[in-house]
Amino acid sequence: MKILFIGDIYGRSGREALEAHLPRLKTKYQPDFLIINGENAAHGRGITSKICGQLYDLGADCITTGNHVFSQKETLFFIGDDPNLLRPLNYPEQTPGNGYGVFTTSAGKKVLVANLMGRIYMDVLDNPFRVADALLDRYKLGKDVDAIFIDFHAEATSEKCAFGHYMDGRVSAVIGTHTHIPTADTVILDGGTAYQTDAGMTGDYNSVIGADKDVPVQRFVRGYAANHMSPAGDTGSVCGTLIETDDATGLAKAISPIRIGGRLPSTEND
Ligand code: FE2
């Protein structure tokens, strides 16, 4: 099975880049399942029901999020009615929405997608390692589901790397999000789990992680923020990761980074 994951959509530049390039990526790679992290899709902070609709229209089977999931207050009210939109699973139990979902592809294969958040330099939620253990006690790869994909939304590379190794052999893929910078470590770990520390954002890279660069640069120079940040508005790059799983075991057979558009070097030269 081929799973295409698209990294954090950031503002209008990200949405437009996705609209411009996703059809070509879908034609070229023919993914069986498409997951998009949309937590910065609404002006850099959160997601709206309208944008969720746009991502579904583009073919998203599941939308993951992270620490900004509730930055648009409306999300608190509609996420409970949208099983395809996930928030981090390690929020407290009564939090609106779902932290994972089991989805069925058009070929009848079952894909479990879970969204978890790290705790280093982030709001401290429940221990994502323990929460993942509890989930995987209930769902065995290759037996209960055909693939398990985890979007691990975290800041610290060490925590992400450790989480990948902890999941190794139990899930198809652990792909990191949140830092908005794609990392060059797409690998299949020893036990067969595809791993990348961060898929990178889908947005304008002439920015500070998606935001118009002047305000964050001056914030570091002065030590305080003089203005609110807003999304950078130039042409965006689409960043993502393609994973191919073994139909019998659910483990990964291949992983490759995807970059197209904007100012990043492209992986799509043909
Ligand atoms: Fe984030």
Image (cartoon, rainbow, N blue to C red):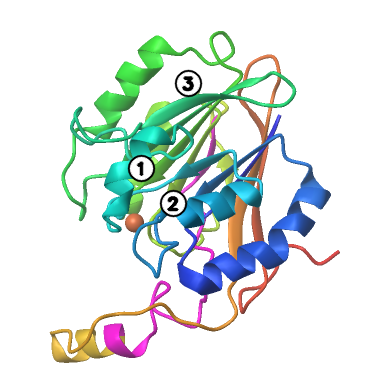
Which label is found at residue 131?
none
Q: Amino acid at mark 1?
A: Phe
The answer to whether residue 171 is seen in the rendering is yes
**Distance from label 2 to label 3 (Cα)?**
33 Å
Question: Which residues make up the magenta segment?
Answer: 193-216
> What x and y, as percent, mark residue 181?
46, 64
What residue sits right under mark 1 in the picture? 78
Q: Where 261 falls versus 105 (above or below)?
A: below
Do the residues under discs 2 and 1 have CB atoms within 8 angstroms? Answer: yes
What residue sits right under mark 3 in the picture? 170
What residue sits right under mark 2 in the picture? 49
**Mark closer to the chain start, 2 or 3:** 2
The answer to whether residue 203 is seen in the rendering is no
Q: Where 234 falls versus 194 (above or below)?
A: below
> What x and y, as percent, mark residue 45?
34, 64
Question: Left or right: where does residue 8 sit relative to residue 107?
Answer: left
At x 30%, y 55%, the residue is: 68
Q: Residues within 10 Å of mark 1 (few under 14, many from 20)?
A: some
